[in-house]
Image: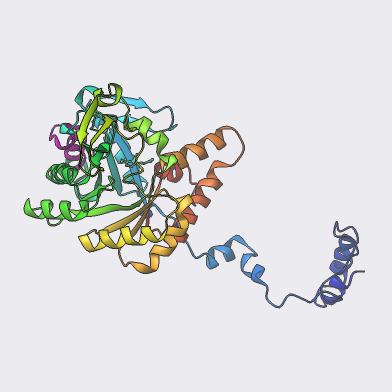
Amino acid sequence: MSRTVEDRAPVAAGAADAVAGAADASPAGPGLTPGSVLPTPLARPRRLRTTAAMRALAAETAVEARHLVAPFFVTADPDGEQPIHSLPGVARLGTNALLRRLERALELGVRSAVLFGVVGGEEKDGHAHAADDPQGPVARALRAARSAFGDDLVLITDVCLCGYTDHGHCGLLAPTSRGLVVDNDASLARLAAMAVAHAEAGADLVSPSDMMDGRVAAMRAALDASGFENVGILSYAVKYASAFYGPFRDAAGSAPSQGGAAATAPVPVATSGGWGRGGVVHHDLTPPSDRATYQMDPRNAREALREAALDEAEGADMLMVKPALPYLDILARLRPRTSLPLVAYFVSGEYAMLKAAAAAGVLDEASAVREALTAIRRAGADLVFTYHAVEALEKGWLA
Ligand code: PBG
C-alpha cells in the first residue's frame, strides 16, 4: 500500500482498498511520493479546478456577445454576395445580404459592426475620389442599416484610403527626391473628408486605420466643424506592419501596388536637390511595395505607447491594437496606461490560420477560437473585432 493512500485517513476502508489496488497499478509506479521524501504541496490551486461549476466560479475573464464587433466587407451592388477565397465563411456583401447578416448578428447579441468598402478597380484613382462618395458602398450600407435597425446597432466604419487608391496605399503619393512617398499631410484632408462622409451617412464611430500622423486630430476637427461632435473616433492607434493582413487585402483588393496605372507603369523622373546632396537624383515613380513607412515596426513596443498616447491626446475615444495574438504584450502594457476602452483586432490572417488548421483536422476549432478570444480579453482588450463573432455565438463556441 502506498504511503499516499495511507495518509488519506478519511477514506472508507473498502474504498481505500480499491484505491490502493489502483495505486499499485499506477503508471507512476512505486517511486518517491509526497509525504515520504517529497514535500506535501503547501498550496493546492487545483481545488478551484475540481468541477466545471467551480472553474466557472473562479474564472477571471469572460467573452460575451457584447465584447465582439463583427466586420463586414460591403459592395455597392444591392444583391451581390461574393465569397472570399482566403477567408472561408466571409463574403463581400451587397446591401441586402448585409442587412440579413446584421439581423442575425443582432439576434445573437452582437450589437456592433465595422464596415469596409470594396469598390471596383475602375473606381480607384490617385486621389481616392471614391472614398468619400455619398453613393459609395459604405455610405449606402450605413443608410440602409440605420433605417433597418435604428439605434440597436453601433455602426463603425474603417477610414483609410487603401481600398480606394489605384496604388493601394493608405495615403496619397507624392513625388520627392526619394521617389514616390506616402504624403502624410496631403492624406489628412482626404481622410477627414472620408470620416465626415461616413458621419453624414450615419456612422456612430469612425475608425482610422491609415496610420498617418495627426489623423485623429484632423478628423476630430473636421467632424466637429461639420456638426458631428457626437460621432466618436475608434483609432487604430497601434497598428503594426503585419503579414497577417494578407487575406484582408485579398478581400478588399487593397494590397499596396495592386492594380492601377501607378503600379504597373513606373515612370522614371528626375528631381533635383530637395533633401539630397545636390545634383540630380533619378528615381522611378514606383510606389513603395509595403506599408513600412507608416505602419509600426513589429520590433517596437515603447513606440506603441507613444502612438497610443498621441491618439488619446488628439481626441480618440477608443484605442486599438492590431493584430491581436502576436501583440498581446502590447495590449497588456497599454492597459494600465489609458482609461479609454481598448480594442483588439483579431485580423484576417489570424482567422485564416485557425480556419486552415481546423480544415486540416489538426485542431478543434471551437476550443481554439474560445481560447484565442479569451486570451485577447485577458490581455486587456475590452472589445474584439473578429470574423468569428457570428459563427462562434451561433455554434455555442463561447459558452
Ligand atoms: C486598411 C485596413 C487593413 C486592415 C484593416 N483596415 C489592411 C491593411 O492595413 O493593409 C486589416 C484587417 C484584417 O487583416 O483583418 N488599412
Which corner quadrant of the image does residue 133 belong to? top left
Which corner quadrant of the image does residue 71 belong to? top left
Magenta region: 130-146
Q: Is residue 192 visible?
A: yes
Judge whether residue 141 is colored magenta: yes
Q: From the viewer's perspective, is residue 331 above or below residue 370?
A: below
Of residues 304 and 366, the one drawn nearer to the viewer in this rendering: 304
Of residues 202 and 159, the one drawn nearer to the viewer in this rendering: 159
Q: From the viewer's perspective, is residue 383 above or below residue 70?
A: below
From the top left corner, tell me how far across and down residue 94 is, in percent. Answer: 26, 29
* Rendering quadrant holding ligand 1: top left
Q: Is residue 354 left or right of residue 311?
A: right
The scheme the figure's colours follow is rainbow
Judge whether residue 105 is colored magenta: no
Of residues 235 and 242, the one drawn nearer to the viewer in this rendering: 242
Of residues 194 and 383, the one drawn nearer to the viewer in this rendering: 194
Q: Is residue 120 visible?
A: no
From the top left corner, tell me how far across and down residue 210 is, in percent. Answer: 27, 45
Q: Residue at x 17, y 34 (%)?
A: 140
Q: Residue at x 53, y 52 (%)?
A: 371
Q: Quadrant of the N terminus?
A: bottom right
Give the main secondary structure, helix, strand or loop, of the magenta stretch.
helix
From the top left corner, tell me how far across and down residue 202 is, in percent. Answer: 16, 45
Q: Is residue 88 left or right of residue 273?
A: right
From the top left corner, tell me how far across and down residue 55 is, in percent. Answer: 57, 63
Which corner quadrant of the image does residue 29 belong to? bottom right
Q: Residue at x 44, y 62 (%)?
A: 332
